Image (cartoon, rainbow, N blue to C red):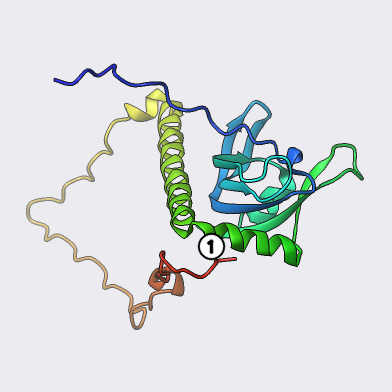
Amino acid sequence: MTDPFDRNLPPDGSDLDMKDLRGCAAIIIVGGCHVAVPTKFGVKAGIRCTVVILNGPDEGKEYTDALLFNSKVVRKLRGAPSGTPYVVHVDVDETGTNPMVVLMDPDAGETELARAWFRDDPAHYEELLKLTVASFDGQEAMMSQSGQAAQQQQRPAQQQRSAPPSSPPRAPANQAPSSPPPLANDGPPRPQSRAENYTKPHEDPWSEEPPF
């Protein structure tokens, strides 16, 4: 029998502060958007992603399984398909009361930095991509289960113990049961919608071309 305690603690979560990346270029691989994440400031939407810093003091540093709550960043990325990579220039808007992180389009030099990073080790990019998507899917499933459990606990106890509905009175023995009314003819069956028929297109995960 193997020793069940022969392991270390899991690594800490990402401590990325996007304001620290002001003026830098970065690759953001989007896992997806969690629409309701409990935080000390209330329930907020957050982008689960991987961030690779391309220049600046922390050039080459990678933040895997990062969760971004910056409001403008969330609005920018919440509609992005899972597994989508972006090259961005990070800036901070200080025109309001609170500084806001903003994502801007990269210039040609910053885009070339991203392509050079990719060409240096395409397999590593694919590894980060798969890890990011799997992390989002796993956390999303856990949040969904937690939400369902909380809803069940909040149901009034009297509803859980409610009596079954009473049966309708039986007809006399000498009376024939009434026939159900005929079903209305609504025409031909409803065709499936585009969403029901939608299948996400498969992309070659081992393409040697930069995805940026």
| Residue at 33%, 21% in the rendered image | 7
**Spot occupied by residue 9 in the image (x, y as percentages of width and height):** 42, 21
Residue 145 in percent (x, y) is at 40, 37
Q: Residue at x 41, y 64 (%)?
A: 205
Q: Nearer the viewer, residue 211 or 74?
A: 211
Residue 70: x %, y % from top left: 71, 42
Quadrant holding the N terminus: top left
In the figure, residue 18 lies in which quadrant?
Answer: top right
| Residue 119 drawn at (x, y percent) | 53, 62
Rendered position, 37 above or below 170: above
Secondary structure found at label 1: helix
Q: Residue 147 or 56: which is nearer the viewer? A: 56
List the residue tagged with mark 1: 119
Rendered image quadrant of residue 16: top right
For badge 1, the amino acid type reads Arg
| Vertical placement of residue 85 versus 15, above or below | below
Q: Residue furthest right?
A: 95
